[in-house]
Image (tube, grey):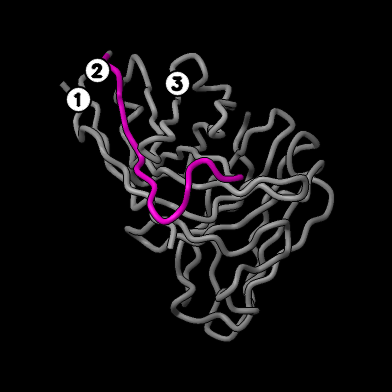
Amino acid sequence: QSALTQPPSVSGSPGQSVTISCTGTSSDVGSYNRVSWYQQPPGTAPKLMIYEVSNRPSGVPDRFSGSKSGNTASLTISGLRAEDEADYYCSSYTSSSTLVFGGGTKLTVL
Amino acid sequence: QVQLQESGPGLVKPSDTLSLTCAVSGHSISSNNWWGWIRQPPGKGLEWIAYIYYSGSIFYNPSLKSRVTMSVDTSKNQFSLNLSSVTAVDTAVYYCARHYCSINSCYVDYWGQGTLVTVSS
C-alpha cells in the first residue's frame, strides 16, 4: 500500500485559515469515510483531531474541520493560533482491512 | 483512563529480531478494539505496521507482512510485536496504539508514548 499524498508544508499567519490535502485512491480514501487526522507537536505522540472524515473528538476546538471529495480528504484549520504549529497526518482505512498514513504536513504559523 | 506503555530493547543488531511489548491499563484488551503498532523513523512520517483483535485476528501492512508477527496475551492485558531480519531502515520510534474500528470508523484513539529502537551493530 502506498502512503497517502500530503503537501510537505503549509503556512499561515495567526487568524488565517489553512487547508491540508490528503490524496489517496479508490482503494482507500475514495471508498471509505474512515478518514482520520492527527496532530503531532515535536517530540510527542500523535493526537486524534478528526475521525470519520469530519467528526471531532471531545476537546478538539471547532476551528478544526474535515471534508472529503472523491479520493481527496482535507483538513481545514481556521483562526490559526501559534499552538497549532505541528505536523499533521491523515490516515485512511483500506480495502485490505489495514490502515495507511499520509506522508505528513508541517504547519508553520508565521 | 486508557494507558499504553511500550517496553523492549532500545538497541537491536542487524539481522536480529526486534521484540516489543505493549502493556495496557485502564481498559480490557478483550474489548471491542484493535490493538496495533505504528512506527516513525527519525525525522520522517508515520508508518502503520499491523493490528490484532483479542480473538487473534491480525492484519499486517503488506510491505512488512513477511517479517512481522503479533500476539496478544489477555491474561496479562498486553500485546506484542516481533519484526525479524531488521536493518538500519527499521530504526524508528515504535508506538503501540488502540484502534477503534467499526462499520463507519477506523482510527487510533489512544497512543503509547513511543519507544526508540535503534538497529546497529
Image position, residue B93 (x, y; %): 33, 42
**Separation of marks 1 and 3 at Cα, in angstroms:** 19 Å
Which residue is disc 1 drawn over?
B120
Image position, residue B66 (x, y; %): 49, 14
Residue type beneath disc 2: Pro
Q: Chain of mark 3?
A: B
Residue type beneath disc 3: Val
Number of numbered callouts drawn:
3
Is there one chain holding both mark 2 and mark 3?
yes
Q: Residue furthest left?
A: B121
Residue type beneath disc 1: Ser
| Helix, strand or loop for disc 2 | loop
Which residue is disc 3 drawn over?
B68
Which residue is disc 2 drawn over?
B14
Q: Residue A41 occupies which quadrant of the picture? A: bottom left
Quadrant location of the N terminus of chain B? bottom left
Disc nearer the start of the sequence (1/2): 2
Residue at coordinates 32% horizontally, 48% vertically from top-left? Answer: B5
Residue at coordinates 53% horizontally, 32% vertically from top-left? Answer: B52
Disc nearer the start of the sequence (1/3): 3
Mark 2 vs 3: CB contact within 8 A: no
Residue stretch rendered in magenta on the structure: B16-32
Residue at coordinates 38% horizontally, 22% vertically from top-left? Answer: B83
| Helix, strand or loop for disc 3 | strand
**Separation of marks 1 and 2 at Cα, in angstroms:** 6 Å
Q: Residues within 10 Å of mark 1 (few under 14, many from 20)?
A: few
